Amino acid sequence: MLGWELPPHNSGGLGVACYHLSRALAQKGAQIDFVLPYTAEHPGVDFMTVHNATSLEPEMGVHLGSYDSSYVTELDMKEVDAGDLSTMRAVQKHYVTFVEQLVKKVQPDVIHAHDWLTMEAGVRAKELTGAPLVVHVHATEFDRSGEHYGNPIVHEIEQMALDMADRIIAVSNITKAIIVERYGIPADLVEVVHNAIDLESFEPYEYDQRDYRYFEALRKEGHLVVATITRFTVQKGLTHLMRAAARACEKYDKFVFLFAGDGEQRDELISLAAQYGISDKVYFTGFVRGKQWRDVYSVADVFVMSSVSEPFGLTALEAAHHDSALIISKQSGVGEILDNILRYDYWDTDRLADQLVGIALSPSLATTLRRNIRDEYARISWKDVADKCVSLYNRVHEGVAA
Amino acid sequence: MSKGLTLYLHVHQPYRVRPYSVFDIGEQHAYFDQKDDSDLNNEKVFLKVADKSYWPMVTLLQKLLDTHGGFKLSLSITGDFIEQAESWSPDLLEAFKRLVATGRVEIVAETYYHSLAFFYNEQEFDAQVAAHRRKINELFDVTPTAFRNTELAYNDDLAKWAEKAGYRAILAEGWDTVLDWRSPNYVYRPLGTDSIGLLLKNYRLSDDLAFRFSDKAWNEYPLTAEKYVNWAAQDTEGSLVNLFMDFETFGEHQWADTGIFAFFEGFVGEWLERGNTFYTVTEAVTQHEAAGELSMPDTVTWADSERDLSAWTGNAMQQEALKYVYELQNDVLRSFDDSLIRDWRLLQSSDHFYYMATKWEHDGDVHKYFSPYDSPYDAFLHYINAIRDVRLRLMRHYNLGGLSPAETASKEEAAS
């Protein structure tokens, strides 16, 4: 298993997904060698062998712009200066070399590589061992770059690996469509396996209403708290969300919008709120973690996922767990597995505004959404994800042997 | 022993509410005029179903009536359907008139607007039944003698009402829980009535056509006319077989390529050839003695596995929507504003509430099939916005002395 991060040293959903998938696979009897680009302790990871490709600290390896692929300038690994470990390509070069050595010692039955970060290593491992390569796509360069084109070098890395893969896993139909249409991969090579949510990882806790006291006070006065938790990047569609917020406020006064997170678009969003004249209704929390992060879900009446392109979107399931009503853009993969949500096209700000006002004015709509989503999300389990992967491994293995 | 078959088909198309947003409220009042390519475009849907179902089935029925003197059937046609046909396919209405003119097609009474008004407001219910009666009379020159309530929603009180209103027959679902050991293949006398006859839908045989006909996983697939005639004639107790279903079963729920039309033609011929009979619903109750008294204190409908009103009233959104629409009655009626009254009545169609159902587990697929919306929540949102607009129109009507905003504006201008 070729990954880039594992909790607690993760900066996003990829690490969480890799952790739960690996654990569920191990519980089904899979023996996993998991390669990371950094060295660190991973408490609780005793179900697989973790390999460290470099001696870098996790913050170096992980936060080296793994979600910001725009700094990648060399396609050919040979041109990469491996001595300078401050660049993404250099870390990737070390990662590939490490994997080359590893597969000399351990012959894999299947190589499972996650996203463009590890794709080259996956392809090398396949070349060296002849083992089938499964490429698991959590996000493509198109997703990471929002409405822009993205980095052509990263596109090329993705293209090469997708062409070489024996089978591809896409985390949603949206992602599958991108792989088929934009990378020209035959549809029957791409299987959709949606992510899941692990309820055990949410320890029971008492919501103490302390972190967001102001919002709780407003709620008591009849305000509706609308929240989103995300990185403030183009991909997340937040400028559209802000526009919708302004439109909703034209029709209903008692809204509070909580933008939790941080990112390159923060200043733009702040000035946009001012421009729309709703600054007093919009709150920016900055980067949140732990309890502050969790309590955003608790204080939210409505959780909005406004992404322009979201392969999956685990935060929506987390919000559902905390009893929020969900509004999810049709461009977010998580919406494919949920019935009890409101959907809109990310650019359709009037529609989103209409939905927000609708929830604010109709207690029965809010109640029905919240009650029904709770019954729904809890049925989605990592065990089912692992079952689908094992079935795919078996088929791809036979395919290669034959 | 020969048997009598009562075939009753329900003809209806709702006026679906378009994506009507909070930004439309007060701006424009056209709730039903979606003009895109979606299934919310009522004209588009009507013409599509006319093509697939109404025309081929009406043509086939005409042919069967012309060929077999013994063939008869009953139809209920809602006001919503008639108005849509008048707008978009007047020829189709003429074709229905020709069916009725044979004298062997009975028109069954119901509410004009396909509403559940009986359960919310009896005065409004009476008004809608009367409106339907007038329309049927004007169009087909007949006066109905049998009654069916929207969605076959029936209870003892409805039977008493229908008897008092002069109907000789009334229709209901033949649901096992109510029938217990009794067969649906007899005429019954509703509890507390003297003369009206109750006909019960044989839902197994009806659903064999309506739901299972094209189901390849069904162990009786493919269903042949001969096999079906055998079931209807031999395998059931009693002297009547009541087949009640949507008219759109033929061609729309079961497409032409499933063979449903050929099947139906074959079935009618085979049924008569073996010495059996067709009845219209009123004939069925007048030519058969009631086998006994039957009580249905709780409302029974023909939808979902529960066969109660939960398909329309099961969740909080549906209850809120129903409450809001019926609350407006007095204000709407005393406005004497025809377009307001019409819109309010179109908003009472049971279809709107059906689309808001959130029963995913058991009957979710059926609801999804019939719903033109992405989700029940969308259905609710658009509907509630339309209700809010009706409220705003009422406010303007009463606060502004009945003037439209434009008139008020010009008046203010003149005053200043």
Image (cartoon, rainbow, N blue to C red):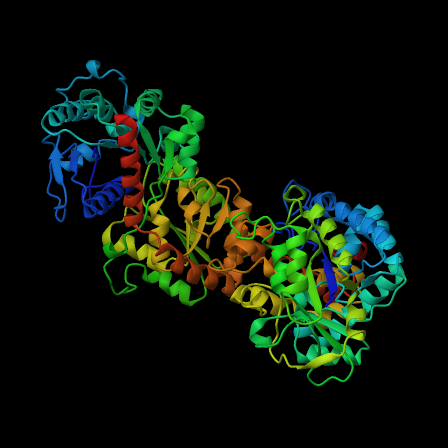
Q: Is A157 located above or below residue A38 in the figure?
A: above
Asked whether B327 or B245 is in front, the reply is B245
Observer able to see residue B348 = no
Residue A312: quarter of image: top left
Q: Is residue B369 above or below residue B282?
A: above
Q: So how many labels did they put on this image?
A: 0
Q: Is residue B145 above or below residue A324?
A: below
Residue A298 location in percent, x, y? 33, 59
Q: Is residue A73 toward the left or the right of residue B304 in the image?
A: left
Q: Nearer the viewer, residue B277 or B22?
A: B277
- Residue B219 in view: yes
Farthest top residue in view: A79
The N terminus of chain A - image quarter:
top left
Q: Position of residue B378 (x, y in %)?
A: 55, 53
Q: Tell me the quadrant of the picture where the C terminus of chain A can be found.
A: top left
Q: Is residue B149 left or right of residue B218?
A: right
Q: In the image shown, does A164 or A266 lie closer to the viewer?
A: A164
| Location of residue B51 in the rendering, given as x and y in whole percent from the top left corner | 73, 43
| Residue at the (46%, 64%) spot, across then down | A367
Q: Residue at x 28, y 19 (%)?
A: A73
Left or right of B82? Residue A281 is left
Residue B352, picture quadrant: bottom right
